[in-house]
Amino acid sequence: MRILPAVTLLAALCVAATAAQARPLESVRKEGTLRIATEGHYAPFNFFQGKQLTGFEVEIAELVAHKMGLQPQWKALGFDALLTGLQQDRWDVVIASHAITPERAKAVTFAAPHYCSGGTIVSLTPRLRSASDLKGKLIAVQTGTTYAAEVQRLPGVQAVKNFPTDADARSALVSKRVDAMVTDRFVAKELLRKSPAAGFHLGEMVTVERIAAAMALGNTGLADAWSQALQAVMADGSYAKVSQKYFQEDIRCPAAR
């Protein structure tokens, strides 16, 4: 669901051209550890419970790493810094609900998708359900996501307002500084589950996306090994168990079922 804007993508490409060589699979296996970065502020996918990093993506990544015979080492930091650190060889993998897009594929190498989702309308009124209902409205999105560009393409939208985090966008909605927000559909469902009295209403999806972990551009050996381990995790039932824990459904892409 999430992607850096075009200017940042170009910057990432420039960084990639001058950055240190990413660790190939052989080096990762020799050390025995897999350095994984995420945001840590995007429940239920990656978030902190106290000082413990957890969430659907965290648990899936740890299953994948162990299936690869590696020990995961985690780093949590701001979403906008994840790609830069990847290109600078500060970590091997980024897993933070990044959507696969042609633009991003110019800057990173994607593994196989670990779930499919889309941007969903959240509002304080049941009248805002579809894309056409957003005409003349002010819409909140998180900075660095695909949703900003997608919502701007919708006919008649008054404006799109960017916020540093999904929680900031939600606060703007609660305080009625915006008319609606667009966020990941599973994040939206979790929001309703945790805050049933807040008056949130879920509308339709305005985007459909495949979500995958990212490796440094050209590091296909590591990406392929991750994809193979992910397939094994899906095949042995452990993926479905984690997915049911967080979503009460299997959220893998239909082609992977």
Image: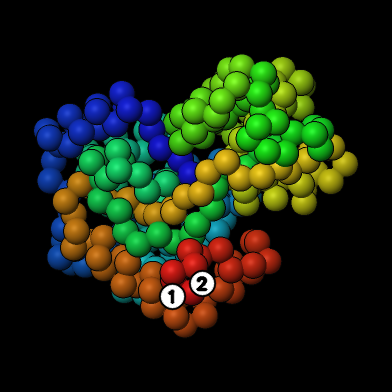
Looking at the rendered structure, the kind of residue marked 2 is Tyr
- In the displayed structure, 238 sits above or below 203; it is below
Work out whether residue 48 can be spotted: no
> Which numbered marker is on residue 239?
2
Q: Position of residue 118 (x, y in %)?
A: 54, 47
Quadrant in which residue 168 is drawn: top right
Kindly identify which numbered label has been placed on residue 233: 1
Q: Residue furthest right?
A: 197
Amino acid tagged 1: Val
Is disc 2 placed on a helix, strand or loop? Answer: helix
| Vertical relation: 72 (above or below) 201 | below
Q: Residue at x 73, y 43 (%)?
A: 202
| Horizontal relation, residue 159 to residue 193: left or right | left
Nearer-the-camera pick, 123 or 109? 123
Distance from disc 2 to disc 1, alpha carbons, whole Å, reads 6 Å
The residue positioned 52% from the left and 80% from the top of the image is 237
Work out whether residue 65 or residue 229 is closer to the camera in this orientation and state it.
Answer: 229
